[in-house]
Amino acid sequence: MPRHRGMSRKHREWLAAALFLLPDVIGLIVFLGIPMVLSLSLGFFEVDGFGTYAFVGFDNYQKMFNDPLFLKSLRVTLIYVVVLVPALYCTGLALALLLKQDLPFIGLLRGMFFLPHVISLVVIGLLWKFMLIDRVGIVNKFLSRIGIDPQSWLGNPDYALGTLLVITVWFLMGYYMVLFLAGLQEIPTEYYDAARIDGARPWQTFRDITLPLLKPTSFFVLLVSTVAAVAGAQGFDLVYIMTKGGPANATSVLIFYIYQQAFQFGHYGYAAAMASFMVLMLLILTGILFVVTKGGRFDFD
Amino acid sequence: MDQTRSLKRMANSGVNRRSVLKTTVAAGATALAMPYFYSRTAAQDPLKFWQFYAPGGDVATQSSWFEDMVASWNEQNEVQIELEYIPSSDYIGGSKLSTAFAANEGPDIFIISPGDFLRYYNGDVLQDLTPFMEQEAIDDFYPDVIATRAVDNKIYGLPMEVEPMAFYYGLDAWEDAGLTADDVPQSWEDLLGVAETLTNDERFGLLFETAPGYYQNFTWYPFLWQGGGEIVNEDGKTSGMNSEGGIQALQFWKDSIDRGVSPRQLLGSGGGDPVANMVSGFCAIQNVGIWAISELRENAPDFRYDVFKLPLPPNGTYTTDLGGWAFVANSKGQDPETAAQFCVWALGSMSEDSIQRGVSWCTEAKSDMAPRASVQEKATASGAFDEGAMKKFAEEIFPGGRAEPRVPPEVYKAVSDAIQACQLNAADPAQAAETAATQIEGFLATYDGAPIL
């Protein structure tokens, strides 16, 4: 049988696709793939930050699970994620539902809730720190007027993480509100009209129309906020500015502890091992999300 | 062209997956090493001097001191020096310097505090300055102050300043509370008592640093030492954190919070910032170092205040912590010898110029004690320590002081966790001290770097 000269149509298409994808793939490999592989392999070395590398196998990983501070920051991160993700989901959705309505100055209102998100986190951290200061801060002054004793909101380990969470929610909820607003606007109004004619109560409308049709947005919000909570800059910046991981390691989230080990203590290998572990955790969480939502595809699609 | 055949030819000519892989790895390695080669070959570049003062720093006198010094060097020497300003928030506790070294792009000259000395020394990036120094100049430095910058009689850093810790108090608050000069506390118990008198709904009586970090440890050490405690005992193998001195120092800071006289969070940049905390009226007494004099002079010239030396625990011996930063040269930089010569020329030679530079840093740009006898004598002769707080620092507070210890990060963190746990998390001091001592001793068992002092 004579051999075909040139490539088959299938192969030519395959080559074209590859060429079109190449620029992106190269970018991903150079700026994400290689650093990720290097970071993963760094976890098997002891690196002092001055050019000395020593292969230590799984020592860093062993050390991790015997390090009380690592376990503590793991606990802090877990609380942070378990509280932050649902809180962002609920506040973002609630705000979106409120601001979906036809109110006067609706654009201004939406803008106001989104506003914290465009301010630098450093400024936000410093402002809140000032407002929350012990005894004489504006928050304590206000609370003492309504009969609540002044507290050290950032200086008491019992409250510090909670305070940080409230500020993070305040800062991020406007962003998730915008995501939900976009999702809500995609829902055809016919469903609501039909529900109204059938005499559905608001709660029924929300439960049977809004929530199911918001599934893709919900999936996206949960995914993004989980990643942001575990590895995001928001948590790190606020901790760095407001508490430095204190008081008594109460706000030492994993990403902050990794930063400390790498850049303050010079244990780059150990930090890389912890970072790898964190990525693994995130992968598992994301995997669970994908499985639960059947790969992000939804039945009405 | 026949694609299949050409691919086949490539395969036959030895271009296989393995060789492609080899080429990629080689190319990658070359690319990664490029900055290294680049920095090695560009010898004519000016030497970089990183610090948090100049050019264009916050305090004009300090910035111009650095600029004048470098301008003077550049006039006299072929190899030029270039100042690079790093904001102090990025420099101290930030990642700027450590990332630069990790990428083999560290500055040629930089400044470090004793807290960071061991990390850089053990990382083998500090250039020995001794060969460039005259013996007379070496002897001119106070032995205690130079000891934390030296290993095996070799000097790796030249201190710019000596900064003892003390207590500052606002005279208006003091007098309003009905206190007089006789009420200046002599003991820890007196101090807490006076702080109680000064505390009200709007003000805390006494302020200690509360943010975890090298600075907090630095401010706590004198209380540890006063009762005979040590971070690492002389044998280099055991820790004195769990001694009576260590436990009572932890208890002291814990008491200040429990009795409601000290805040858990501070204003401005924290415990080292007297304007944001004491001048603002947030606290009446503040634990801070000698540098606060120049800060108050610059930023609150009308504020009335006085200073007193650290009070003592029962049967305690007076001491304070002497902080301060030092010039160091990068032994892996582009021209370590010239960098070292610059450090010595600037701060460590017997020339009139070098001594005068020390005087103007300690008395005009800042308000510090000098690290060298000749500089201290000259500054004293110029009247810098004749009156007010500077006089008290020179005569009462500085004598008996101990240089800020140099400790590796593992030891620092163990101490920091003990302080934080007791001060802010109601931990039992004996228990916290024991935990810290165990952690430190565990680390010392395998530590083989330069001695911890």
Image (cartoon, rainbow, N blue to C red):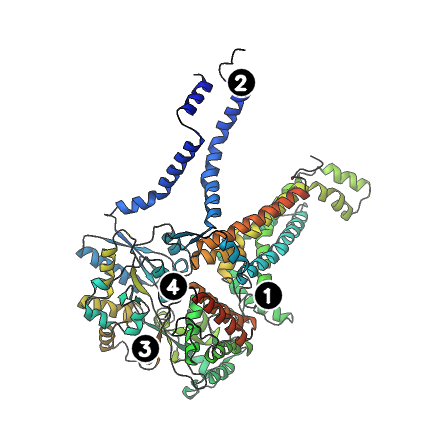
Q: Disc 2 to disc 4, how far (Cα)?
A: 66 Å
Mark 3 nearby-residue class (10 Å; few <14, some 14–19, many ≥20):
many
Q: Which residue type does callout 4 highlight?
A: Asp
Check disc 3 and report its element: helix, strand or loop: helix
* Residue found 45% across the figure and 19% down from its top: B3
Do the CB atoms of the residues marked 1 and 2 lie less than 8 Å apart? no
Residue B133: horizontal and vertical position, in percent?
Answer: 21, 65
Asked if badges 2 and 3 are on one and the same chain, I answer no
Reading the image, the residue beneath label 2 is A8
Which three-letter amino acid code belongs to the residue tagged 3?
Met
Of residues A239 and B230, the one drawn nearer to the viewer in this rendering: B230
Q: Quadrant of residue A137?
A: bottom right
Left or right, B243 with reference to B451: right
Q: Are marks 2 and 4 in contact (CB under 8 Å)?
A: no
Chain identity of mark 4: B
| Residue B448, numbered label | 4
Q: CA distance from mark 3 to mark 4?
A: 41 Å
Q: Position of residue A182 (x, y in %)?
A: 63, 41
Residue at horizontal 60 percent and vertical 56 percent from the top: A78
**Upstream in sequence: badge 1 or badge 2:** 2
Q: Are marks 3 and 4 on the same chain?
A: yes
Q: Residue B268: in sight, yes or no?
A: no
Q: Which mark is residue B128?
A: none
* Image: B321 above or below A108: below
Q: Is residue B84 above or below residue B434?
A: above
Residue identifier under label 1: A159
Which of pointers 1 and 2 indicates the residue nearer the eye? 2
Q: Earlier in the sequence, mark 3 or mark 4?
A: 3
Frontmost of labels 2 and 3 is 2
